[in-house]
Amino acid sequence: MKAWNKFLSLFLTLIMVLALAVPAGAVESEKDLTGYTVILHTNDVHGAIDGYASVTALKEQYTAAGASVYLVDVGDFSQGDPAVSLSQGKNAIDLMNLARYDLAVPGNHEFDYGFDNLKDLQNQAWPGFLAANVLYDSNPAFTPNRICTTPAGVKVGFFGLATPETATKAHPAKIQGLTFLGGQEMYDCAQAQVELLKAEGCDVIVCLGHLGIDPGSAPNRSIDLLEHVDGIDLFIDGHSHSTLADVQSVTNESATVNGALLTSTGSKLKNIGVVEIAPDGTMEALNLDTAQLQTQEGFTPDAATAQWAAGIQAEIDAQYGVPFATTQVTLQGETLQVRTGETNLGDLIADAMVWQANLLGEPIDGAILNGGGIRATILAGEITRRDIQTVLPFGNTLYMVKVTGADLLEALEASTYCTPDPTGAFPQVSGITFTLNTGAPFSAQENYPSSTYQKPDAINRVTIHTVGGQLFDPKETYTIVTNDYLGAGGDSYYSFTDSPVGYDLGLPLDEVVIDYITSQLKGVVAESDYGQAQGRIATISYRDVKASDWFINPVIFVTRSGLMQGSDGAFYPNDNLTRAMMVTVLYRMAGQPEVSAPPVFLDVDDNAWYADAVAWAYEENITKGTDTLHFSPDQPLTREQLATFFYRFADYERFDEIVVEGDNLTDFTDGNQVSDFARTAMNWAIAEGLITGMGDNTLAPQGTATRAQVATILMRYVSE
């Protein structure tokens, strides 16, 4: 940290960032940083325009101290807040011009308004965007690289990389003709840039990348690329909203991969990135907390940039800052939440979509929107149009598709491929209930066309229960309202493009939500309606259970009801259930009432995890033990014992005599093998449809009962 400590003693101390107690102060004119190269960097600003004045001032401070300063941005500056999205990025470009940015890489959100708009922005900005891996009609869409030479003669070679995920994170209609190289093609492209810049005599090679470090972005992350490309000295990253601390956590605290220093600054200009390169070539990366920087003595945000940003903000507030409704609860739209599970804000938006589409006359079965399309939380209190447009900044419109149940199932499987890791494709839904098994493997062999998302070749993780209030049928055709981005196959929803009927309703999604809140909710988002997520999406996590297994619904049922649980990430469906486990399940069904006396059996310790359950079962005559002194808790449960337990439990619940008519045992070839103590119970279980036999016209009464079989009978019993 030699370079930074020297510079810190000149003009400011960032106590919280560096955890050092050094007096703060402005740059002293006699101090000289001549020979130092400083790269200031930002990423994923997403419309936090009030921070640009600090960026401008920081560049001026370093420049005044004699350093050669380059200010760069690595993408997603033109979307995320009405302050920039309403102008389709122009306001951001104006502020970045004031701050005198030198270079930028287009993030995926720079393409939200179309490639033509992006080219217009480029014409209004600095020498242009860098992106070596983006092609338009097979030709470079942007300048691949730029070489800058400092007054000290240091040649710094910059090249840019845009995330290949743009192919599925941008509206397909707005990126026609563009190709985003990913995987090995991107690695080869980057290596070629390194060799070219080396041949030009560059002393330092810097990759400006909008790739990120999220697991769901593999193999197109910055850390993946650096493991495959040699010769990069510095990689400035964006896309995953990661800070330098996050980078350190995935690189064993070194922040280096294959010899390259890797850094990033989070999002929303909460930090400003600094990389200092000393005359001897040593390099140090820092994240400066912008809010703390603004409080330092001797540091003043640039007045002209601040005034410009304030003017933009005032115009937005005048148009969109007037409250139109209130919410009694915080509506959760934080990135991690909406990309990993159901949230109350996701429910509200999806409900609004169904409500609006139904008003057009055609019954809607359900709605789906991608969690990545929700960009902010709305705090309890007043709601303004600006709040809604901050949540939904993309200008999406409602889109209607008719899809088969099979295509709907494929879409949900593909969009939850990496959950519980976050993905922007994660579905927020209305009119659809499903369970996601995050422990089951996602199976795929190929990507969707022109996509980084994979097409599932099996349905392992998702089980749909209902659509439109009816039991799910993969052969049924459903009418689904979504947004135009997903309707065109965006994110992982390529199966929607198979729809024989798909059309844009032309209704802006933000306006739909505003109308729903004002008209349907009467201007109040009530706690009783949206106080929490409404349970449309459930999750389990078992590595040994797949959606195609015959016992999937029983396993989901017993897990969600709390009657049975697995351990160590597995359910063990084919393992035998013990007698202790069986009485414990029934005890849970009974509500775990207090027991008046300890167990009477010699083989049941008073402190055993199943002791209360056995004592209760004995008190209620649900078990008599395997003999008068023993319960045999660890003995595998037989099928006739299983029937007996359920028969006696039914008698306990109903408080009346259970009448069984006829002899159902004669329908099975081994019915005569049922023990005398179990004949009535087995006869009853068959009559009730709880036990249906083994599929070969046998009961196997002395055979053991597996956990999957017991789960199935539990579901049947409760559903009677």
Image (cartoon, helix red, strand yellow):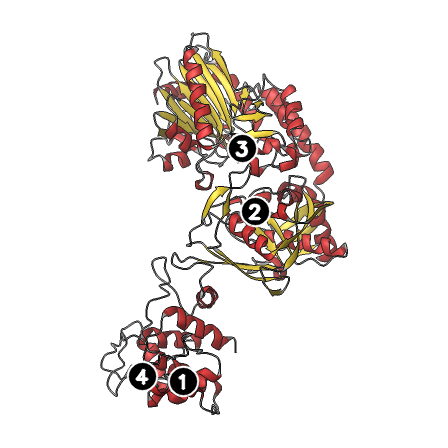
**Nearer to us in this view, 477 or 78:** 477
Q: Which residue was labeled with disc 2? A: 371
SS state under label 4 = loop
SS state under label 2 = helix
Q: What percent of the width, then of the height, locates residue 670?
A: 36, 83
Looking at the image, do the residues carrying marks 3 and 2 touch, with CB atoms under 8 Å apart?
no
The quadrant in which residue 206 appears is top left
Q: Which residue was labeled with disc 3? A: 44
Mark positioned earlier in the residue sequence (1 or 4): 4
Q: Which residue was labeled with disc 4? A: 597
Mark positioned earlier in the residue sequence (2 or 4): 2
Q: Amino acid at mark 3?
A: Asp
Q: Is residue 686 above or below residue 118?
A: below
Q: Amino acid at mark 2?
A: Gly
SS state under label 1 = helix
Q: Which residue was labeled with disc 1? A: 682
Q: What percent of the width, then of the height, locates residue 213?
A: 44, 36
